[in-house]
Image (spheres, rainbow, N blue to C red):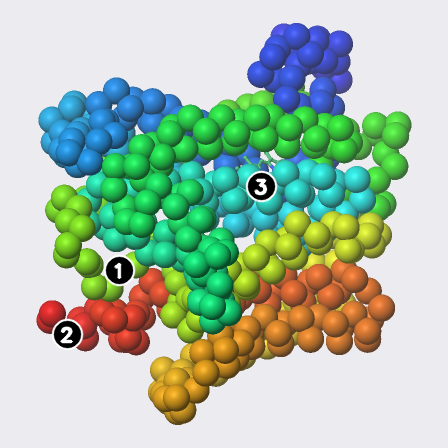
Amino acid sequence: MESKGTPDKKQRVGIITRNFFLHIHATRVHVHSMKPTYTFGLGIILGFLFLVMVFTGVILMIYYTPSVETAYQSVKDIVNIVPGGRIIRNMHRWASQGMIIVVFLHLIRVFYTGSYLGNRSLNWVIGVVLLIITLLSNFSGYLLPWDQLAYWAVTIGSNIAASARELTDLLGITNWLDPGGFLKKLLIGGEVVGQPALSRFFALHVIFLPLTMLVLMGIHFWRIRKDGGLSRPAKYASDKGGENKWYAWPVLMWTELALLLLVVVVVLFVAVVADAPLLEKANPVFPENPAKSPWYFLGIQELVSYSAFAGGMLVPLLYLVFLFSIPYRDREDRYVGEWFSGKQGTTIVMRSALFALLLVVIQLVVIIRFGWLRDWFPGISQWFVMLINPATITAGFFVVVAEWIHWKTRSTRMAALVLFTCSMVALVIFTVVGIWFRGPNWEFYWSVNQWPVI
Ligand code: HEM
């Protein structure tokens, strides 16, 4: 029954279809998609964080100058002189960190609800590209303040890009074929971080990456509509009559507006209580020790400390191949919309997480307590160090266990659950170790208080 003053069905459809912004939704949305515990609103939160980034970024651009002589001072002025500049800079910084966390949470929710299955494979692939662009956007912004933190983090990042050199050096072909050097040069425009790097990062950060992201987001949202709305369990799949559908106007619209407000308030609150870091001006002759890449790449930096090629190139590339190919390897769409693919999947996920935890922690204990091949056999060939290290051992074990589960259950979905869960757990552990337990010279320390005074 419609109460007086409430738009009737026809009006609700009209409100959505006539309005450009509301048009992002179908006029009616399945009741299952409205369940907060299905999506946790993560995709929408990502979109809103992006808006906060663009809004604050445009304001920052008015004062920021992308030159190695003036960049640092311009950021200092934004913080200390421009009215509200400190808050705007903090909001920009914290929203960007929020995006990284939320994009991974969104990836995890989409994966565990099997939402890449069926006709949603293309949208998953677009999502993986969005994930990469989110990371690159952050990384390119990291250099802009041109302080010690930025300079050395990007120096480390660009060295990771050059990690293929470990392999080409071993093959003795670096003079002829140097993909690592090429990648590094492409990224920073030279051998060391300087003005060409700052100009490149600025152009990437303010034009190329945000525009690409905007276009891809548009396609991402459009695909959701084309794919028949959000994924849902098979029992709701053929709800053709629409008996379980709600009008998107007004409930969904108001809920999303409230979420936007919440996102802005949370970002603003964090920006008020915590300042984005700004160390002293970049000094290319005084490296930070430890020099750490941005926190979201510290898992990779930890792997690079075992072997540059295996940790910085091989394993991350294999992981990307895995992410891109999941929907094309796993076609078991009976699991669409079901968290962890039911009871069997839940058990497999829990056991995989435990297995990955034990495997990674045991290796870390061994390596920290007893060292690795080079400590035991100083003259050992670098080939062995490159091929046998925690990065390759971890990845190898995960693949073997996933294959074994595939063989046992005859299910690609179960194997995918193993690989995805194990790699997420490993990524988190390596990242945590890189953030909190690595100090000068990449040695292990329980806390920063134990770091030697250098
Ligand atoms: C900036 C990055 C991204 C934005 C703004 C974004 C936005 C959204 C939104 C608003 C939704 C619908 C609501 C929801 O599921 O929460 C959605 C769904 C979806 N996203 Fe993303 N997303 C991003 C990244 C990703 C990533 C990294 C993946 C996976 C690799 C992904 C894959 C998908 C898929 C497959 C759906 C459909 C889910 C379903 O039908 O249940 N997205 N995304």
Q: Does 8 appear above or below 148? A: above
The residue at the point 69 percent across, 12 percent down is: 17
Spatial separation of the CA atoms under disc 3 and disc 2: 41 Å
Residue 344, image quadrant: bottom right
Name which of mark 2 and mark 1 comes first in the sequence.
Answer: 1
Kind of element beneath mark 2: loop
Q: Quadrant of ligand 1?
A: top right
Residue linked to disc 3: 129
Spatial separation of the CA atoms under disc 2 and disc 1: 15 Å
Spatial separation of the CA atoms under disc 3 and disc 1: 28 Å
- Rendered location of residue 195, percent (x, y): 25, 37
Name which of mark 3 and mark 2 comes first in the sequence.
Answer: 3
Residue contact between numbered discs 3 and 2, judged by CB atoms under 8 Å: no
Kind of element beneath mark 1: loop
Residue linked to disc 1: 291
* In the foreground, 355 or 40: 355
Label 2: how many residues lie within 10 Å, few (<14), some (14-19) or many (20+)? few
Q: Does 414 appear above or below 190? A: below
